[in-house]
């Protein structure tokens, strides 16, 4: 069966639609080009409010998700629970280095109290139906994180991803009740930027694109 041809837009409307598409594309490109990772120590209050956090999660949920597995989840660490994370960071440090100094231990604890909004990003890589490849699931998590970071940037916040040796600690797994097949990937920090670093150089198209 031949599908009917959609009606043509009047010329003036067509120009307006094209112009609007160009504006949206320009805005998206500007956001992508100007976004930068901001360290948690440079993020202070105010952070996203409840409604803004809801919008950030909606953006994260819009990531590509082949098989609709939702192979990731996020755990918010509110201010009253930051001390628990600080305990884990300090204990994980001592597990690695029993001779860690008092300053090193305090530095490990302090990392749990940076940024007004702090979340842990968790990848679900265990058995699932349909059984999508692990790399595909990690791509989905990456897209989810990028959506979140870009919307935070559009809202006027700074945001960044951090990890470290504590990510592999059994203590961290226990605190966040990670299930078999789940992996702690990174922390997501969002807040108001106190100081921005110069933009780092980005790869040019010819450096990352080749032709078969």
Image (cartoon, helix red, strand yellow):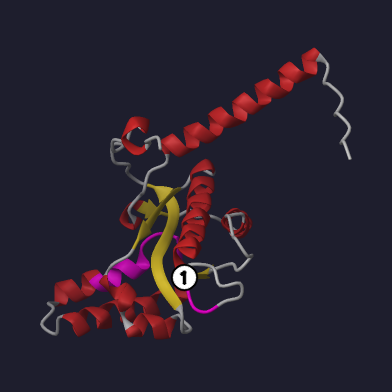
Based on the displayed image, in which of its 4 quarters is residue 86 positioned?
Answer: bottom left
Residue 120 belongs to magenta span:
yes
Residue 92 belongs to magenta span:
no
* Above or below for 109 versus 52: below
Q: Residue at x 36, y 67 (%)?
A: 113
102 to the left or right of 38: left
Residue 50 or residue 91, whichever sits in front? 91
* Above or below for 17 versus 141: above
The furthest residue to the top: 11
- Which residue matches tag 1? 122
Q: Residue at x 41, y 74 (%)?
A: 82
51 to the left or right of 174: right
Q: State whether residue 194 appears in this view.
A: yes
| Quadrant including the N terminus | top right
Q: Secondary structure at mark 1?
A: strand
Residue 159 or residue 103, whichever sits in front? 159
Read off the magenta span.
Answer: 108-127
Residue 38 drawn at (x, y percent): 35, 49
Residue 139 or residue 45, whichever sits in front? 139
Residue 205 drawn at (x, y percent): 37, 32
103 to the left or right of 113: left
Q: Residue at x 61, y 31 (%)?
A: 24
Q: Residue at x 54, y 28 (%)?
A: 26
Residue 80 drawn at (x, y percent): 46, 75
């Amino acid at each position: 069966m031949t599908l009917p041809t959609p009606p043509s837009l009047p010329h003036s409307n067509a120009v307006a639609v094209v112009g609007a598409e160009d504006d949206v594309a320009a805005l998206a490109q500007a956001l992508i080009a100007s976004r930068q990772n901001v360290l948690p120590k440079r993020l202070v209050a105010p952070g996203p409010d409840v409604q803004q956090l809801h919008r950030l999660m909606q953006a994260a949920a819009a990531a590509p998700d082949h098989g609709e597995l939702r192979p990731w989840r996020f755990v918010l660490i509110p201010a009253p629970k930051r001390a628990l994370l600080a305990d884990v960071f300090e204990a994980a440090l001592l597990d690695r280095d029993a001779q860690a100094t008092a300053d090193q231990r305090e530095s490990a604890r302090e990392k749990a109290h940076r940024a007004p909004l702090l979340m842990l990003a968790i990848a679900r890589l265990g058995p699932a139906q349909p059984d999508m490849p692990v790399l595909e699931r990690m791509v989905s998590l990456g897209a989810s994180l990028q959506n979140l970071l870009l919307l935070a940037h559009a809202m006027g916040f700074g945001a960044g991803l951090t990890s470290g040796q504590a990510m592999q600690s059994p203590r961290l797994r226990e605190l966040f009740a990670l299930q078999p097949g789940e992996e702690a990937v990174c922390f997501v920090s969002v807040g108001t930027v106190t100081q921005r670093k110069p933009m780092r150089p980005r790869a040019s198209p010819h450096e990352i694109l080749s032709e078969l």
